[in-house]
Amino acid sequence: EAGVVQSPRYKIIEKKQPVAFWCNPISGHNTLYWYLQNLGQGPELLIRYENEEAVDDSQLPKDRFSAERLKGVDSTLKIQPAELGDSAVYLCASSSPTDTTDTQYFGPGTRLTVL
Amino acid sequence: AQSVTQLGSHVSVSEGALVLLRCNYSSSVPPYLFWYVQYPNQGLQLLLKYTTGATLVKGINGFEAEFKKSETSFHLTKPSAHMSDAAEYFCAVSGSGTYKYIFGTGTRLKVLA
C-alpha cells in the first residue's frame, strides 16, 4: 500500500513569491491534515479535511495561506506571499474513516526555504 | 485540553544500551498516546500507540511503551540500542473521540558506537 505522497520535497523561493505544496493521501483515507513543523519543534495542525470539507481551519493564517481539496482526494496548500518566517517543513497526513482512533499517517514533508 | 512534555531534547546512549525516552502528558479526557520517529529529511513514522486495553504497548523496531495513568506518563523504551535508532522521536496525545494531536517538542536520540 502506497503511503502519503507529497511534492515537491524541497522548495527554495524568494520572499513575497507564491508557493504551493501538493499531497496525495493513502487510498481510502478520507481525512487529510496539513501540519507545519518548525525547526526543533513538533508538528502543529494547520487544517483538517473530511472529504472535501475543511472541518478545522482555525490555525490556518488565512491572510496568506489557503488550501483546497476539490475532489476529496489530493490537496494543495498555498502561501501567497511567502515571508521569511514561513521557512519550515510542511507535512501532510491522512487517516482512515474506519479507524476510530484517528491514527494519522504522515508523508515525507516539503521543506520550504524562503530567502 | 491536552499537552505533552518530553524531558530531554537530546539523549545519547551507547550501542547495545537501554533506550529510555520520557513523555508526560495531560489530558482532560481519556487519552490516546502515540510515539512517532522522524529520520533526517523524512516524515513521521508511527512507532506505536495506546488507545485502550493493555497498558504495555509493543511497536516496531523493538520499541515498547507503557501507559501509566497514575504518573500521566508514556515513556518509550528499547532494551538494546542500535545505530539505526538514531533519529528524532515525538510523543503525541489526542483525546479519545477527538482527532487533534498535540505533539511534544521531540527528543533527538544519538547512538554512540
Image: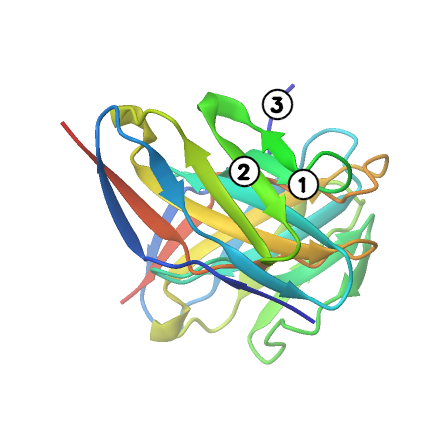
Report how far apart the C-alphas of labels 3 and 1 lie in the structure.
Answer: 24 Å
Please tell me which residue lies in front, B42 or B60.
B60
In the rendered structure, find residue A14 and report the number of the disc placed on it: none
Q: Amino acid at mark 1?
A: Tyr
Query: For this view, does B63 lie left or right of residue A48?
Result: left
Q: Amino acid at mark 2?
A: Ala
Please tell me which residue lies in front, B56 or A76.
B56
Is the same chain shared between marks 3 and 1?
A: no
What residue would you read off at disc 3? A2
Task: Name the residue at 66% across, 42% down.
Answer: A104
Query: For this view, does A43 lie left or right of residue A71?
Result: left
Q: Amino acid at mark 3?
A: Ala
Report how far apart the C-alphas of labels 2 and 3 lie in the structure.
Answer: 27 Å
- Quarter of the rendering containing residue A27: top right
Task: Name the residue at 86% across, 34% down.
Answer: A98
- Quarter of the rendering containing residue A103: top right
Residue A3 lies, with reference to residue B42, above or below; the image says: above
Task: Name the residue at 37% across, 74% down.
Answer: A85
Chain letter of the residue carrying label 2: B
Across and down, in percent, residue A48 comes to 72, 57
Q: How many marks?
A: 3
- Quarter of the rendering containing residue A4: top right
Q: Is residue A106 in view?
A: no
Residue A64 lies, with reference to residue B111, above or below; the image says: below
Q: Is residue B69 in view?
A: yes
What residue would you read off at disc 1? B50
SS for callout 1: strand
